[in-house]
Amino acid sequence: MNKDLIKSFSISIISIIIALFISVFFVMWAKSFGFIAASELLFTSIWKGSFGTKINLIESLVFATPLIFTGLAHAVAFKTGLFNIGVEGQFIMGMTAATLVGLIPGIPAIIHIPLTMIAGALAGMFWAFIPGYLKAKIGTNEVVNTIMMNFVAQHFTNYLVMGPFHKPSSASTHLIQKSAELYRFLGEHNRLSVGIFIGIAFSGLVYFLLWKTTIGYEIRAVGFSPTSAEYGGVSIKKNIILAMVISGAIAGIGGAIHTMGVQHQSIQLFGFTNFGMDGIAVALVAKSNPFGILFSAILFGALNYSSGTLMLYGIPKTIVYLIQGIIVLFIAGEYVFKLIGERRKKGALVNG
């Protein structure tokens, strides 16, 4: 591990510590406690609510599993200099496509499971291809386009759930076939499936893709310096589309695995799942490192699940969102300072 990577991760760790420290003051204000008592209450409740019992540990990992995929999806886009805010919509489309294929009866599990995952990947790829193509060919802003695609994905899913595939007297589809469900290795009553191991495997695949292949080299080259990459014969347009498609495929597979391993159906969405949105923070904290994303996803999964326990201790669950927001704020500040530093260096060179 080189010095830059160590320094980069140390900033993430410091950001987490500062976020926890600041959040203690809000607990002091909410509970009228001293600093020591508020710290003990906050950290104890977070620990008990996330890792304190076997059930809480399992559920924290359940929450972390989709964040691994959405974090990886954002990491691929970030490495290309893109902001694929549409990971949320691509994740939703992966869930929906997996449900539609998972409902088909009479397919052996050995075929049905990979077929359902492929359907999720293709749905995510298609949903990411549209803004990627528009960015590459027309130059439209991928942030605006992907945000709009998120809303289309949500309402399209609701149309299917409450329309052609509606289960009577419910706000959902029928359950997918048993042959399309992922194995829950800790028992049927626990929601943790082999999807978490697939997520770990994908971290290795994304690392191999980005750092051990020509495709990954070109993607990173475009993200590092588009002008230099183009001068070296790398097609910017091709790699923008390719990165978006890869990002969408990972998000779509994450959505499929969430359906196959946890929900086993599609439900009416009254808002976003937020797995795609939280994936932005996961990728930022991990500095877009595929292996760092595993730990970052567990951190955010644990924080999200522990919010219920915080309420039992009289702490507003919004403290969790405060912690996450402060972490992202400090890490984003690092990027801003880097940008300012680079511009000052360029200005000094020009003036010199």
Image (cartoon, rainbow, N blue to C red):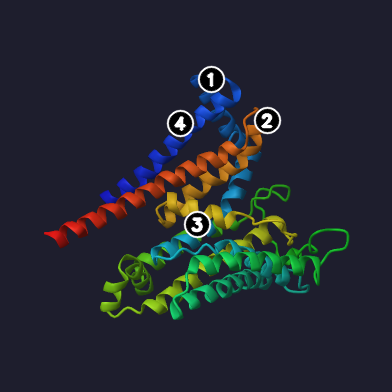
Q: How many marks?
A: 4
Front residue of this view, candidates 262 and 14: 14
The amino acid type of the residue labelled 1 equals Ala
Structural crowding at the residue carrying mark 3, measured as other residues with C-alpha within 10 Å and reported as few (<14), some (14–19) or many (≥20) = many
Q: Which mark is residue 71?
A: 3
The amino acid type of the residue labelled 4 equals Phe
Label 1: element kind: helix
Outermost residue to the front: 351
Marks 2 and 1 sit apart, C-alpha to C-alpha, by 16 Å
The amino acid type of the residue labelled 3 equals Gly
The residue that disc 4 covers is 21
Which of disc 1 and disc 2 is earlier in sequence? 1
Marks 3 and 2 sit apart, C-alpha to C-alpha, by 30 Å
The amino acid type of the residue labelled 2 equals Leu
Front residue of this view, candidates 149 and 280: 149
Which of disc 2 and disc 4 is earlier in sequence? 4
Marks 3 and 1 sit apart, C-alpha to C-alpha, by 35 Å
From where the camera sits, is residue 322 visible?
A: yes
Structural crowding at the residue carrying mark 1, measured as other residues with C-alpha within 10 Å and reported as few (<14), some (14–19) or many (≥20) = some
Q: Which mark is residue 312?
A: 2
Image coordinates of residue 345 in percent, x first then y, are 20, 56
Which of disc 1 and disc 3 is earlier in sequence? 1
Outermost residue to the left: 352
Label 4: element kind: helix
Q: Quadrant of residue 306?
A: top right
Image coordinates of residue 146 in percent, x first then y, are 54, 67
Marks 3 and 4 sit apart, C-alpha to C-alpha, by 25 Å
Is mark 2 in CB contact (under 8 Å) with mark 1? Answer: no
In the image, is residue 319 above or below residue 212?
above
Left or right, 158 with respect to 61, comes to: right
Which of disc 4 and disc 3 is earlier in sequence? 4
Which of disc 2 and disc 3 is earlier in sequence? 3
